[in-house]
Image: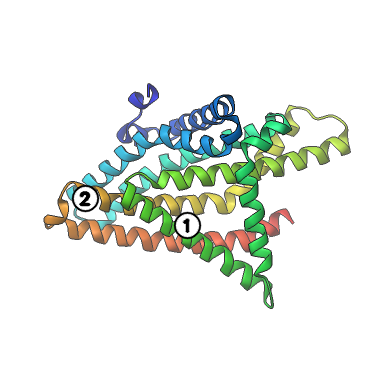
């Protein structure tokens, strides 16, 4: 891609916010192209096109991270470098979210039904599973269901990254479409309430609704996605190390130690994210 030639991990680390616009462009183009060319299958094609656009950057990022593991000795310095990588990947994901949620809000209802068909079915299925598992101590049941589901997604991210290199971007792109659909539905409902109450809306009202929706899902969503990216980096650097035959060197021990630290950190972040989703988000938006 043309844009790919302007973006590489080193540049992204220096200007991580630029990845927001790159991610927005990837996602918006994927959504519109899938409706234009593959309308009946657009909900899945949109994810595929987003993945195809993001793969080169993800692969180059994993190669860069594995190289850093072989060059740096102290784990603290390695983790600091990973945090810089994580920042620009999160900006890209937020770009995905904004683009998908805007597509959900701005497109006609019949196109939204096509573009987010699979995503809305997934949201309904998740809600049914969570509500269906609730019994006795409801809060504990909900927390356990959410945390265990997030850990399962983390394991998929690690395995996808290990077996497919940058494959973890597929799961994250899919999650971006699901969260974007949930955000868009939430915003549409708020807009409808405002319209019924005030009659007409101005630019400030739309900005307020969009900011509210983004904030609602970012409270726990951003930590969850950060954990998935961390897991993807862990699996990816092992995969790249094996391709580069670094497992035959003494530095492979450092790579495995770093990957283990990243996985443990990801699980801890998911635990915190589950607490935020169960206790904090409902308290703010109840």
The front one of 23 and 55 is: 55
| One can see residue 214 in this view | no
Colour mode? rainbow
Provide residue 64's location: percent of width, then percent of height. 26, 41
* On screen, residue 35 above or below 164: above
Task: Give the residue number, with chain letter if any, for mark 1.
Answer: 153
Left or right placement of residue 164 versus residue 122 in this view: left
Q: Quadrant of the C terminus?
A: bottom right
Left or right placement of residue 194 versus residue 9 in this view: right
For the point 60% across and 41% down, which residue is it? 180
Provide residue 116's location: percent of width, then percent of height. 62, 40
The front one of 207 and 227 is: 227
Provide residue 4's location: percent of width, then percent of height. 36, 27
Residue lying farthest to the left in this orientation: 249
Left or right placement of residue 167 versus residue 127 in this view: left
Give the number of marks. 2
For the point 52% across and 27% down, which residue is it? 29
Task: Give the residue number, with chain letter if any, for mark 2.
Answer: 241
For the point 76% across and 42% down, which residue is it? 189
Q: Quadrant of the N terminus?
A: top left
């Amino acid at each position: 891609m043309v844009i790919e030639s302007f973006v590489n991990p080193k540049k992204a680390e220096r200007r991580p916010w630029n990845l927001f616009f790159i991610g927005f462009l990837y996602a918006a183009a994927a959504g519109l192209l899938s409706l234009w060319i593959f309308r009946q299958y657009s909900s899945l094609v949109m994810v595929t096109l987003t993945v195809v656009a993001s793969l080169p950057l993800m692969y180059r990022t994993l190669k860069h991270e594995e190289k850093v593991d072989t060059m740096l000795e102290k784990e603290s310095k390695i983790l600091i470098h990973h945090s810089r990588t994580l920042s620009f990947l999160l900006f890209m994901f937020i770009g995905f979210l904004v683009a998908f949620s805007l597509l959900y809000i701005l497109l006609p209802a019949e196109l939204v039904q096509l573009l987010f068909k699979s995503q809305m079915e997934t949201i309904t299925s998740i809600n049914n599973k969570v509500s269906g598992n609730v019994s006795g101590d409801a809060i504990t049941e909900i927390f356990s269901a959410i945390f265990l589901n997030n850990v399962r997604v983390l394991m998929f991210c690690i395995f996808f990254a290990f077996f497919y290199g940058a494959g973890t971007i597929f799961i994250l792109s899919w999650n971006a479409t699901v969260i974007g659909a949930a955000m868009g539905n939430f915003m549409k409902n708020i807009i409808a309430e405002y319209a019924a109450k005030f009659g007409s809306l101005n630019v400030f009202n739309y900005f307020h609704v969009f900011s509210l929706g983004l904030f609602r899902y970012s409270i726990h969503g951003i930590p969850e996605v950060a954990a998935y990216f961390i897991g993807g980096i862990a699996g990816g650097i092992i995969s790249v190390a094996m391709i580069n035959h670094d497992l035959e060197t003494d530095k492979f021990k450092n790579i495995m130690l770093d990957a283990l630290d990243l996985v443990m950190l990801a699980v801890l972040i998911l635990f915190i994210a589950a607490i935020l989703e169960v206790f904090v988000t409902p308290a703010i938006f109840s």
